[in-house]
Image: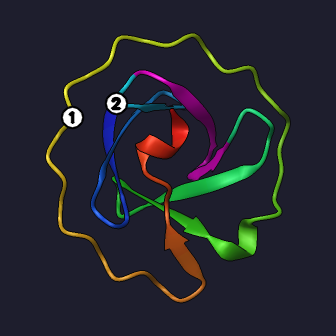
Amino acid sequence: MDWLWTWGGEFFGYRDDQELWTAEGRHVGRFSGEDIYGANGSYLGEIMNDNRLIRNKAKASWRQGACSPFARRTAYARYANYAGYNVYSGFEDFAGSGTFK
């Protein structure tokens, strides 16, 4: 299990094998390499710097096969937020976990 934060520094949740989970226990995506795709197959974002989530605007239209979300899991206590990074040109911050409730 790998803990993850958004590019802006907000604690998001974790990666368990090829699945992305919020700290609240909601399954929100599946990894394909470092890219993340939602239940409907749309590109959500990717991992950079080992534990930060970011969204590449050029990949916004990318799609993969849809998947059924898993049932909720037990929530984890939230880790502290970190300082954010400056966003690279052509990228934007990954949506916070509150977006996926």
Q: Quadrant of residue 22?
A: top left
Vertical comparison of 57 with 9: above or below: below
* Left or right of 69, for residue 49: left
Q: Is residue 71 left or right of residue 38?
A: left
Q: Which residues are magenta?
A: 25-37
- Residue behind mark 1: 78
Q: Do the CB atoms of the residues marked 2 and 1 lie less than 8 Å apart?
A: yes
Magenta segment, prevailing SS (helix, strand or loop):
strand
Q: Secondary structure at mark 1?
A: loop
* Placement of 6 over or under 67, stated as above or below: below
Tell me which residue sits at (43%, 42%) in the image. 98
Q: Quadrant of residue 14?
A: top left
Residue 97 vs residue 68, the one in the foreground: 97
First reached walking from the N terminus: tag 2 or tag 1:
2
Residue 79, image x and y in percent? 17, 39
| Residue at 61% from the left image edge and 15% from the top image edge | 70
User: To which residue does mark 2 refer?
Assistant: 23
Q: Amino acid at mark 2?
A: Ala
Closest to the observer, 5 or 64: 5
What count of labels does the image hold?
2
Q: Would you say residue 33 sits in the magenta stretch? A: yes
